[in-house]
Amino acid sequence: MTAQDWAGRIKGAALAGLVAFALAVPLVGIDTNVDDATGHGFTTRFSWVVIAVASVFAGKLALGFVPHFHWAAPQGLRRRTTLKAGRGVFLIGLAAAVFALALPMLPFSSRYLVDLATTVLIYIMLGWGLNIVVGLAGLLNLGYAAFYAVGAYSFALVAQDWGLSFWLALPIAGLLAALFGILLGLPVLRLRGDYLAIVTLGFGEIVRIVLINWGSVTGGPNGIDGIPRPSFFGMPFVRNPPEGITSFSQFFHLDFDPGQRIVFLYYVILLLALLTNLFSLRLRRLPVGLAWEALRDDEIACRALGINPTSVKLSAFAISAMLGGIAGAFFATRQGFISPESFGFQESATVLAIVVLGGLGSQLGVVLAAVVLVTLPEFGREFDQFRMLLFGAAMVAIMLWRPRGLLSARAPSIRLGAGDPA
Amino acid sequence: MSVDKTPLLEVARLSMRFGGVLAVDDVSFTAYAHDITAIIGPNGAGKTTVFNCLTGFYRPSGGKLVFHRDGRAIPLQHLAGYRIARIAGIARTFQNVRLFAGMTVLENLIVAQHARLTRASLYNFGGLIGLPSYRRAEKSAVETARYWLDLLGLTARADDNAGNLPYGQQRRLEIARAMCTDPTLLCVDEPAAGLNPHESHELARLLVTIRDRHELGVLLIEHDMSVVMGISDHIVVLNYGKKIADGSAAEVRRDPAVIAAYLGEDEEEMA
C-alpha cells in the first residue's frame, strides 16, 4: 500500500464525509418543535451530525479495503440473468402457485399471515396489470392508482345502490375501469417517456381530487362505508345471519370464526390473480401482445408493417386498467370501506416500483418484488422509525445489484425449436 | 427483365415541402410490376422523402400517388400510414435498420404477420379461448417465418434477440420482416449501406431472387452503383428534389446530366 493510495482513499472518504455533512446539518442537525412562548422553535443536535459524518467517513474508508468492490453487479452475475430461463421459470411459478394454494392450511399459517398474503396478492395483481402497459407496451404510467380507485368506487356504488352481488359487480367495475383506461389513452397517444409520465401523473391526481370533491356520489373525504362483503354462493360470513338466510358456518356445520372470511377472501384474490396471470401470459402470445412489445421497441417500424399504433396502445391501456379495476373492486369488498386516501400517488408509485424492481415484463419478477415490497415494511416493524430507512436501503441495494430488476431475462413468446411457448 | 409492363405505382407530380425547403419538386415516374426500380441521386436529393411519402410517413404537399392492385387504383396520399401497408401491400425497410431489437428474430417475423394473425384470431378473442383455427394460423405464420429464415440463412439465430445479430444479418432480417407482410411492392432504403463488397453482391442476388419467386415490384434506393446497375430494370435519378433522368441502366449511365450531377466523369467508378 503506497502513500499515494492512502492519500486517494482519505480524499475520497473526506469528500463523502463532506456530502454527508451537507445533508446531515439540515436533516438531522436541526429539530423543529413547538415552543410555548413563541409558537415555534428548534433545537440543535450537532452530536448527531458528528456521528453521521464520522460513520460515513469511516465507512467509505473501510470500503477501500474490500478487494474489487464495485457499486454494481459483477460481470458474472449480470451475464447469468440473460440466460434462457424458460422451463425453470415455469416450474418456479408452478411451485409458487401450489404454495399459495396450500398457504392457509400450512401449520405455521395464521390469520395475520393470510391477511398479509391477501395484501401481497392484491399488489401482485396490480403489478401484473401495470406490467402490460409499462413492461410490455413500454408506456410509463404514474397514475395507475386512478384505475384501482375507479374499480373500487364503481364496485362500491354498484354493489350498494343496485344491490348486485360481488361476482356481478366485479366485471362492471372492471369494464368501467377499462373505459377510464381508454379515456386516459386517447389524449396521450402521441406521448412517450417523460411526457407520458407527467400526463398520467396528472390523471391520477385528477381522479383522486374528483373523488374528494364530488361528495354527493363518492362521499368526499369520508369515503364510502358499509360496502357489501362477499358471500360464498349467497351464504354470508356472519355469526347471526338475517331471517331466511343460511350463513357459511351454519351450512357447513362449522363453528363461526371470523377467520373463515379472511381465508375465503384470500382464495378469491388468489383465483383472480391466477386468472390475471393466465390471461396476460396468453395475451403475450397473441397478435396484440406481440404488437405491444413491438410498439415498445419501435413504433415507426410497427406502422410500416401495417400495425395500427392507436388501437394497440388503447388496448394496452384498457386491459391494464381493467385488471387494476378488478383488483380495486376486490380491495373495496375486502375493506368494506374506501376513501380517496387509499388511492394516492404513493399507491401508483408502489405498484410501479413492483414492476420495475421485478424486471420489466417479467411475470415472476412482479411476484418476487411484490412479496419483497409488501412484506419488508412488515418485517421491519420492530425497527420502528427506522423502518422506512431500511426499506429505502433495500430498494437502493436492489437497483445497484440488479439494475434491470430482480428477473430481467425475457422469455420469447414463441420459439422455432419447439414451436411451443417455454 | 419482365415482359409484361403493368404499372404498379404511378407517381404524378409529387411535391413535398418542409417550410421553405422543397425536398421533392414535381417528380413523376412509374414503377412497373415485377420490375426492380432504383431511385438514385446524391445525398439530400429527396430519395428517402419520396419513400416516406409513398409509405405514408409524410403527407405529400402536392401530386398524386396511385397504386394498382388487383385491378383497383388506390390513391395512397389519402391513406393513413399503417393502412398503406395493409391495403396497398407496400412494405419497406429503413435506412438505419429498425428492428424490434428486444424481441427474437422469429418474433420479428411473426409481428410482421400481425394483420393476418389478428383476423385469424378473430381480433384476439378467438385466440384467447384457444380456437384451433388460430393455432393453425399461428403454425402457418411460423412456417412462413421459417421459409424466410432458411432463404436468408438466419435459421440458426431464430431464437436470438434481433438486436444481437451482426449488422449484415440485421439488414437481411429487415428485408425478411418486410416480406412477411406479403407485399406487392417492396421498398428498400439503402440495403447495401455498411456492407462489404461480397455482402453487397449477395444482397443484390437476394433482391433478384425475391422478385422472381414472389412476383413483386421492388423499389430500391441505393448508392452502391455495382448493385444498382447490376439488377435494376429501370432507374430514376433525382437531384435537388427534381427528376433529372429516367430510363434503363444503360440509358442513365450515358445521360450527361446524370454524369455531371452524380456519377462523376470517371467511368470506372460505376463499373
Image (cartoon, rainbow, N blue to C red):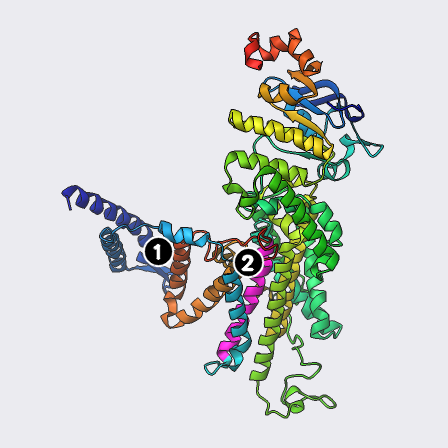
Please tell me in which quadrant of the rendered image residue A308 appears: top right
Question: A114 or B214, which is in the foreground?
Answer: B214
Residue B174 left/right relative to B70: left
Residue extending furthest toward the right: B71
Question: A221 or B256, which is in the foreground?
Answer: B256
* Lower sequence index among marks 1 and 2: 1
Residue A65 percent location from the top left of the image: 22, 52
User: Callout 2, which amino acid?
Assistant: Ser
Q: Mark 1 lies on which chain?
A: A
Residue A155 left/right relative to B68: left
Question: A331 or A226, which is in the foreground?
Answer: A331
Closer to viewer: mark 1 or mark 2: 2
Q: Mark 2 lies on which chain?
A: A
- Label ID, residue A27: 1
Look at 37% across and 65% down and name the residue there. A386
User: Callout 1, which amino acid?
Assistant: Leu
